[in-house]
Structure formats: C-alpha cells, structure tokens
Amino acid sequence: MIDCTRREFMAAALAGAALRINRLAASTPSAPAGGGTILWYRQPASIWSEALPVGNGRLGAMVYGGVETDQLQLNEDTLWSGQPKDWNNPEAKKYLPIVRRLVLEEGKYVEADDACKHMQGPYNDSYLPLGNLYMKFEGQAGWTNYRRELNLDTAIASVTYGVVGDDFRREVFSSAVDQVLVVHLACGHPGGFNLSVSMDSLLHFSTKVAGTDTLCLEGKAPTHDDPNYLQTPDPTIYDEAEGMGMRFGAWLKALPEGGSVVASDNQLTIQGAQAVTLLLAAATGYKGFEHFPDTGAEAIGAKCRERVEAAARKPYSQLRADHIAEHQSWFRRVSLDLGHGDAEDQPTDELVRTFGETHDPRLPALYFQFGRYLLISSSRPGTQPANLQGIWNDEVRPPWSSNWTTNINTQMNYWPAETCNLSECHEPLFDLIEGLSKNGRQTAEINYGLGGWVSHHNADLWRQSGPVGQGSGAPTWANWEMSGPWLCAHLWEHYQFTRDKEFLRRRAYPAMKGSAEFYLGWLIDDGKGHLTTCPSFSTENTFIAPDGRPAQTSAGCTMDMALIREIFGNCIEASRLLGVDAEFRQKLEKAKERLLPYQIGGFGQLREWSIDFKERNPGFGHMSHLYPLYPGSQITNDQTPELAKAARVSLERRLQNRAGFGGWPGAWAVNLWARLRDGDRAYDSLTFYLNHSTGPNLFNVSRRSHPVLFQIDGNFGATAGIAEMLLQSHDGAISFLPALPSAWPEGEFKGLKARGGMEVDVTWAGGRAREALLHCRVSGEQRLRPPKGQTTADIVQNGAKVPLAHETDGTVRVHLASGKEYRVRFS
C-alpha cells in the first residue's frame, strides 16, 4: 500500500508527465554550439569498460544500459580499505648515509638499491567498489530501435528503445545538488513497467527494507589491503573478527507513477507503473584521514535516509532541472569545434574504431569535452581528489590499488583543471596536499631526521606519506621522495591562473614553504661545488651501471633538479609577493644557484641521470627528465633553445624505441610536442593515443593488451594536450594556436584559460587565426604572441584601439583592465 503523502506526490508528478514521457526526443536540452557532446551506441555495454560513467564528485556509477536486465556499478569516494596507521620507518635514518656512501663514494649502485629497501614501509590501502544496483524487467523481449547515450552537456546517461509499439526511456544521473543517484524509467502508456530492483556488494554486506518502498544495504570493508580478504572468491564468508574496517551503506527508494511497490528482504518489486524514479544515497563511516572510521551503521543509514527523503520531496522534473543547471554552470564554460569529418554521424564506438582511417576531427573534440566531464564528475570542492580511476572502480583489488600515484598519475589528473576552466575542481587536490604536508612532517623527521615535509610515490585516503614496498619494492618507485614539490606546483599554477593572493597566502605558500624546507636539508654537496640529491631516482626507470648490471639508485637525477629548482623559485617569488620570509628567501636563492645544471648527453639528448648512463629500456614510458619542458616551464623554445633541442632529441628517442606511445605516456607526449610548438607531431601522438588507448566509452584503456585496464590519467592528460596545442601561457606570453596541426585547418574554441586571469576565445580558418577575444579577470600587463606566420594587427576594446608595445620577438605588450573584453585581430 502507498500512504496518502505518496499519493499526493504522484498526483502532482503525473500532472505534467504525459508530454515528458511521449515526446522522448525533446527530453534533453540542446548541446552548446560547437563540437559534439554526446557519446552514443546501438547496443548495451557487455563489459564494465564499455559502460558509461556518471558522477557528482562523490557518488559515481557505471551504467550498462541493458534492456531486460540492467546494472549500475556503484562507487563512493571515501570507501577505502584500512584506517590510519604508522607507515614511517625509523630504520631509514640509519640507511640514508649508507646509501649515500655507496653511490657517491664507491659507485656501488646495485648495492645502494638493496640498501634502499631497508628504508621502505607498508603498502598503502585500496579504493573499493560500493556495490551494484540491478534492475530486472518483465515484458521487454523483442525490443527495437535501441540507443544508449551519455550527454556530456547534461551529465545524463540514457537508454531508449521500443517494445511492441511502445517507447521506453531510462535516464540516470548523479546529482550534486541533491547528493543522490537518480534513475528514471518512463514509457508511453499506463502500466507499462513491471520490474524488480536489488542491490549487492563484493564486500561484506546485508540488505533489509525500510517501509514499503526502500531497500537498504549495509556493509563493511577490510581493515587493510589484505590479500586473503581481497582474493577470497566469496568475501561474504570471511571471518568478521579477523579484520573489518569502514562501514558503508546505501538506501534505494522507489517512487512509482501509477502501479505499486512492494519491498521484500532483498528487492523492491514495482508492478503496473507508467514511470518509476529510483533514488539512491550512499555514505561511509569516514570521519577524516586522522580518525578511525568508527561511525556506526545506524548513523550511516540516517544520513542515507535523510538524503533520499529530501530528494523524494521533489518531482523528477525538478531533480533533473536542478542537476542540469548545476552541471552546465561548469561544463558550458568551454566549447570546442575542430571541424567536421566527411562521414555521417557515427556511434561513438565506430567513431573510435575508424579514426585511424577517417581522422574525423569530431573525435578529438568529443574526447576533449569528455575529459572535462570526467573531472567535473570525479573532483569537486569537498570531495576526495580524482584517484587512478577517477571515482569508478569495480574491483575489490583494483590495479595499483586505484590510489593516488603521485609520481605523475595524480598530477596528470589535474593538468586540464586550470587551462580548461575548471579551477574549482583543483580544490580536492589541494586538500590532499594539506593532509600529506601534515603527515609528511612526521615522515621527514622519523625517516630522514629533517624539517619540512616529504611525501613519496603513493598516497591513500589516510594520506600515507612514507615510502611503500615493505622491503621488496623497486626503489625507483617505492623510495621516490619527490612528490611534494610536484604536488606543490599545482598550488602555484592555481595562483598563476587566478592571481588569488589570499589563496597564495593561506593555502599555497605554507605547503610550498614546508616542502622547500625539506629539500634545503635533503640537498648535499657533490664535492664539485654543486648541490645534489642522493638517493635519487629517475622515476620508475633503470640504467646500466658501469659494471654492466641494471640499477636504479644514483644521485642528482634531472627530475630532482627540475622539481627542486621549481619549488625554490616559486617560493622565492611567492615570498616576495607576500612580503614575508626574507631570510628564508635568501637561503633558497643561494641554494638554487648551486643546483646541478641540466646537461646534454652523448646522443644530444637531455640527460636523464647526472651521469650519462645507458638506459636499460630506451623506450621507457616515464619521461621524468622532460618535466622542465612540460608540465614545468624551465625549458622553452625561446629562452633555452639548446635545452629545448636536447629535450626534443630525448622525446624522439623515446618514441622511436617505443614505436609511439599509448596510455598516459602518449598523453604526456602530446603535451611535450605542443610545448615544442610542433603541432603535427603533437597530432601524430594524439592520433596514436586515440588509436591504441581509447575504449568504446572513451576511457583510457589498452585496446590490444588490456581492454579492461582503465587509468583515468590518460584521459585528463590528452585533454590537457589538446588545450596546450591551442593556447599556452607558461613562458610569460599568451600564445595563440602555438601548436595547431595541419589536420585542424579551421575551428573555434571559447573559454580556455591563460595565466594572469584571462579567458580566451579564438577562431581560425585556413590554418590562420581570424581573431581572439580576451575576457580579462585581473588587471595587468599581458604579453601576447600571435600564431606562427602572423602578426598582431591591433587590439580593440569597445570600438577603440588599445595602445600596444611591439617587441622584437614578435610579441606585443598591452595593459588590460579587469572586467573588460578585448578583440585581438591578426594579419
């Protein structure tokens, strides 16, 4: 039976439902002009990596889109194994001088590798799947005219099909406004829906009912990343007493329009409904990274109940409209049109499959917007940062724990945040940095006897800052102690783009200073007048030692020098801007002058190690020594041409020996070519990446070797690369179309951001820029660089020409005022 309140709700909802149900094609607003924003398919997903992702930053789902049965795989961003623990290793202090002696005095690199393993601590914990929502339908056999899609502009995944003359539509979205996952089922005649709905989990769980229309799931995660638990075929038989951790829960409420709903122990059954709205809320016992997750099931259930009941007070039309409006306030900041291919509109899986032959520019444009969509969906203020899979993970033992791998992958997730006009999406990363900086002070003291803070290669929900490996990890990743300054670069970049001095004072500078303090103590004299680091690792790479054996531990790797030179330089400038820490600034300036300089090796390449070692794998994917080219900015074509040439040689050698790059290294290559202003080579790398590392749902997967192995960093890195091809501002000038490939002779973008508080629109045709529109958010002088082969004709504001200062390098200097728009014309 349904109570009076529910009947009143249904009457109000049904009053305007007929038009919505029957006019299916009109139920989604038009996408913004310029470039496609819809992924679509003619069949349901058959595996997880073909499903379509939705998320509100915290609550995510992968939508399969089946007809007779459907599955939504569920995630909540704080559901991890484990709890706070002690990962620091006091023994590391004892082995630090041993490692330095072996490397610097005796040249025993392999022995130094072995010594480094004594400095390691426990592995970090894992991000876990919450569970699954299942829908089983009656009377859906013989369906036709199937279409599955994800509308990036509305953040709604939908399925439409016909059965015996009737139209059916299913919509799924994760609402940031109402903090619920919403599933809406509608058909064209009364009584068309008969279905059952259930939930389960790969973790320990049980289900119960609340009233007549709500199904509740309760569960607990393991206390640690325990292989005995995580590899048990049936985890429900695992002994609770031997290690259960965070509690979690999900509440599912069914709101039928017509018909009835009955709740049993393990499912909801809906009969004779014309439409059904399912509302799902989820929560965990997470209380912060410093606290044990001891929130009880009752409190978690109360939070879930509160959310679903609040959402249930809105009609579906209002839930949908509120969700779309909120999402579009983020998504519609940027549009991109790269032109149109010769082929008719294709399903997305076919567009991907045929791209190697068609080079249809709609795919790069769609991929770019999909990357922005993923960042909006997996990283918002107040949530956890996007992890190795964003928020979408279906495995109890996911690849690399689906954690924050901070030797590139976490950072790459946020490469598009500022350029692609999603600065607020950066905030969860800043929260992670603050947590690591707090825990990292203990690691700096206990492991190394130093001040400041340090973090290493892996981090988890509990902000683990020590080296992992448990005495057996490869030092080149397990002992890598350089993630702090790389993470701090994101704080500085956010300031560079926003010019938010209060952010710099309150959040960025304290973390940056603490990191710089550690490296002031970490640096040692190399005996030749320079400061170096030891142990030092070119991330994940291996060299051939003079005795012919492969080794990993050395001193003064190029990436170390790049990151320390950058954090020192950024702290120096920040302290000047804020008018603080003059004495500390002087220490940084003196140390920065003594850092090992960049060196060119025997092949004309930028050296990876301070000694010109032979690489064990010349085609290795991690190109750590190219950091100062991208994402750093210490090597540029104009300011350091010899180093830029050497960086190019390094990149060419890597690609030649790898026969091109797929995955996240391929995404990095796109950005590196863009910084070298080689648009056609950047496009070649992008093409290789799209051909080899793009699944049918546009996830970064290996289409040949690992079709279900998903890492989201490639998605974000390639999105950033496309932006970098079209607009740059890292070297003190805003460069328009700096790496435009010949494959994109015409196009338009709106809303990309440049450093200095600038939003930029550009149109081009025939491979030449027509004009740019600058939306100034912060007053100040700007330097503008026209596209190659063009000059800046004039700049107009409100019909009047603005005074320009022409420089000998082809750039112009101009003063721009906040709140005004300027039209830049080229000749």
Image (cartoon, rainbow, N blue to C red):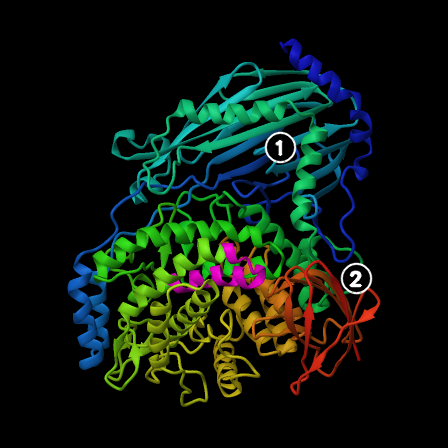
Residue type at mark 2: give it. Answer: Ala
Residue 544 pos. (x, y %): 31, 80
Q: Residues within 10 Å of mark 1 (few under 14, many from 20)?
A: many
Vertical order, 797 against 280 (above or below): below
In this rendered view, identify the residue nearer to me: 237 or 307.
Answer: 307
**Residue at far right of view:** 799
On the question of residue 751 being in view, the answer is yes
In this rendered view, identify the residue nearer to me: 469 or 143.
Answer: 469
Q: Main secondary structure of the magenta part?
A: helix
Label 1 secondary element: strand
- The span picked out in magenta is 483-502
Residue appearing at x 20%, y 67% in the figure: 96
On the question of residue 387 being in view, the answer is no
Name the quadrant of the N terminus: top right
The answer to whether residue 516 is magenta is no
Residue 187 pos. (x, y %): 75, 28
Q: CA distance from mark 2 to mark 1?
A: 35 Å
Give the number of the disc on residue 487. Answer: none
Tag 1 or tag 2, which sits nearer the N-term? 1
Residue type at mark 1: give it. Answer: Val
Locate residue 554 relative to residue 698 in the image: left or right: left
Residue 424 pos. (x, y %): 56, 51
Residue appearing at x 70%, y 68% in the figure: 357
The answer to whether residue 499 is magenta is yes
Give the number of the disc on residue 182. Answer: 1
Check disc 2 and report the residue beneath it.
Answer: 343
Splitting the image into 4 quarters, where does residue 521 fall? Answer: bottom left
Vertical order, 683 against 249 (above or below): below
Vertical order, 601 against 516 (above or below): below
Label 2 secondary element: loop
In this rendered view, identify the residue nearer to me: 244 or 785.
Answer: 785
Dot in front, 2 or 1: 1
